Amino acid sequence: MKENVFRLHLDPEADFPEYPTPNSPDHKTKIIDKNVNAYKDDYGDIKVNVDESDAKVYEIFTDKISLRIDKETSKMSLYDKEKSKLLWEEAEPLQHEKGKTVQTLKTKDDEYFYGGGQQNGYYSHKGESINIKIGGGWDAGAASSPVPFYLSTEGYGVMRNTFKPGKYDFKETATFEHDENRFDAYYFVADTIPKTINEYTELTGKPALLPEFSFYLGHADCFNGKHNGHGDQRTLLEDGVDYLNRYVDNDMPLGWFLPNDGYSCGYGGLDNLEKFVDKANEKGVEAGLWTQSDLKPNPDLPEDDPLRRDLDGEVKAGIRGVKTDVAWVGHGYSMALDATRQAAEGLQKEENSNGARPFIISLDGWAGTQRYASLWSGDQYGGNWEYIRMHIPTYIGAGLSGNPNVGSDMDGIFGGDKTVQTRDFQWKAFTPIQIDMDGWASGGDDYSKEKNPWNYGEPYTSINRMYLKMKSEMMPYIYSNAAESSETSMPMIRGMMLAYPDDPYTYGTQTQYQYMWGPNLLVAPVYKESENDAGIRNNIYLPDKDQVWIDYFTGEQYKGGAVIDQFDAPLWKTPVFVKNGAIIPMAPENNSINQLDGSENRIFDVYPSGKSDFTLYEDDGKSVAYKDGKNISTKITSEEADGKAVITVNEAKGQGYKGMVKERGTEFFINTRQHPDNVTVQSGDKEIELKAVKSEKEYEEGENVYFYNESPDLNKYATKGSEFEKKEIITAPKLQVKVGKTDVTKTAVTLTVDGYNNNQEKEIVDEQVPDIPEKLGADQENVTDQEIKLNWEKVAGAHVTYDLKIDGVIHRNVFDTESKKRTILYPC
């Protein structure tokens, strides 16, 4: 295939089929997206050598890798020739017996494993076993979308080319089995985890770049016919439109709306559906449909029967999204892969939609699903903290398995709780797909657990709105990361090992409840009830001792290379840290992408530190024209040194796209704790004369102006008259600069800030305070396998804190000396 990619195929029948047999003859979709001939076109003929001269082993090798087979035992081993490194070796020869084939490998003490698809509740599998099969429910331990692919930190990955279920056991002696007589696997050798994932998706297909509206909140429920839960009769053009208007009336961002459940609730015929789509589009919202019983109309069913479906007709009526639920994909494997392809192709057909970009939400995925669909984690009960805890590693694991497009229901489909829901809205504002899956949490006249952001009143409504608005304003950052994921398979939700591969602390489960959202934001959701009640989040790992991390909401700065405990996280706040040096493209306030027409100012939230850059990606956000190069990319650079920060927005490069607006203004939000000495802007070869203004209002109304905002308040969208409206969420000062319109394809805009300083004053160290508290220790009865309670003598003086080193890792703010003499440490 390539110098570093090969296929190992053993078939007792000696048939050696090019593709695995699907589970039904009518399943036409293949796992492999790039066949041998396509690899040959890209990489030419690969010289493969066979050496039989050694008395003990056969060697099959390229310039980069070597597969060695023991002549006596048939056990195999794989080497990276460039690094002279053993990647894996078999503990037992390949076995095929009782309808299954098994590969057994030795593992190393410091070797970690990821992959296996969307495994609910897990992503780091060392010492564990996972099922590569459909079924088992939707809670932790279930595989909501398994994938027969895993990767090792030793520098390789493996995909079993099969539609049969399996089980991977990552114990010291690891076994990898599937329920079939043949053994067919692709091996990828790469020196980083992202490169290994990219090799896998080169073979099975790059992840879909979803339409931009999909990254906004969506709502799904029954709005035509008898409601499945409440039992009332509904009509789409009244009840469906009314519910859409409730989002508008509550000033809540909403990107898409699914008005049927596909089981007992339909849409009243294609004419009715088209009228609803028009109403939704008027509100800036795209419409989709839930599940599918048939792709073409069943003539034996009445036209208004919810089970009479017509995908082509529905797309012509204007729908732009499909949720392929259990009725369509529930058998998984080749069935589910085939169904998602049909859904995507139906949405994309030129005669149906003029080439609309498909938005598919699916479950029970397999290798190749990433080409067509985002993943949904299944039906779970909300209202409990396990729901949040489980989903954090679930999302990370899906990305490590080649699908960055993940989502789930907001506070579950069943049950519900005001606090859990709000915590769920907070952290999922920093994830791809969010679904208000309504109508199943309560029944009859009980509407107390409706799935929408305003259901529980204040302060929950205001907090949920704040995070949804934040996500919509960050859409240029999110969409740029989505484009990178589609091109390179680097996930949007990134396990810490992806960003910090040289840090061994990131490889196991110690950091499984936090992640990087793109390259610049670290998110650590509140997922424990006890910590929520205390208004804190413990055990947040900030990597890299040379990196400064900035609390997004307060501007407080933290030195990396340590775990921080008792981080302030009241109800309104989920811990989000900005990497110093970050550049975050932003958009103006909006409630859907369709409220923006591309003429808005480009906005860049910048945290200058040393040298950094970010590439903003833009296309039409709704068609497949981007595949033909119809897009633009803009590189933004930041350089900070010696009290000066220089930020440059370079000319946009690329072919452009339909509807593109070239004349656009530019805004900078520069995070700096010092009022600048001088602010200048160069637009192309022209220096722009800037005017200093003294208020936010003057800034908003002006052009070519700047404003030093000493106390920006992030609480901008609270419900009028609510108690939460009085809450100030003051972050660190920002220099706001607005520059008039220019042709972004021809003109670079450079901002220079003299007298720049965003350094926080250092802590004062009291030399009189002892380095170690007196009588620090733990009573034996206070040491369990779950916690260690430490005691020490209270230290005199205010604001005394100590750090604790555990297994070589510093833990900060562990000892709360002002209020108590004891802390509880929970082992990871």
Image (spheres, rainbow, N blue to C red):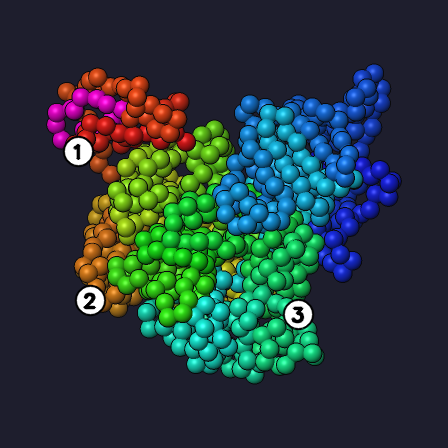
- Of the numbered discs 3 and 2, the one sitting upstream in the chain is 3
Separation of marks 1 and 3 at Cα, in angstroms: 64 Å
The quadrant of the picture occupied by the C terminus is: top left
Q: Which residue is mark 1?
A: 819
Residue 372 higher or lower than 570, as above or below: below
Q: Residue at x 44, y 53 (%)?
A: 381
Residue 127 in sight: yes
User: Which of disc 1 and disc 2 is earlier in sequence?
Assistant: 2
Residue under the point 58% across and 78% down: 317
Picture disc at residue 510 = none
Mark 2 surroundings within 10 Å by alpha-carbon count, few (fewer than 14), some (14 through 19), many (20 or more)? few
Q: Position of residue 779 (x, y in %)?
A: 28, 19
Give the labeled residue for mark 2: 721
**Residue 791 part of the magenta segment:** yes
The image quarter containing residue 798 is: top left
Say left or right for 652 vs 783: right
Which residue range is magenta in the image? 790-804
* Secondary-structure class at tag 3: loop
Q: What's under tag 1, amino acid-wise?
A: Ser
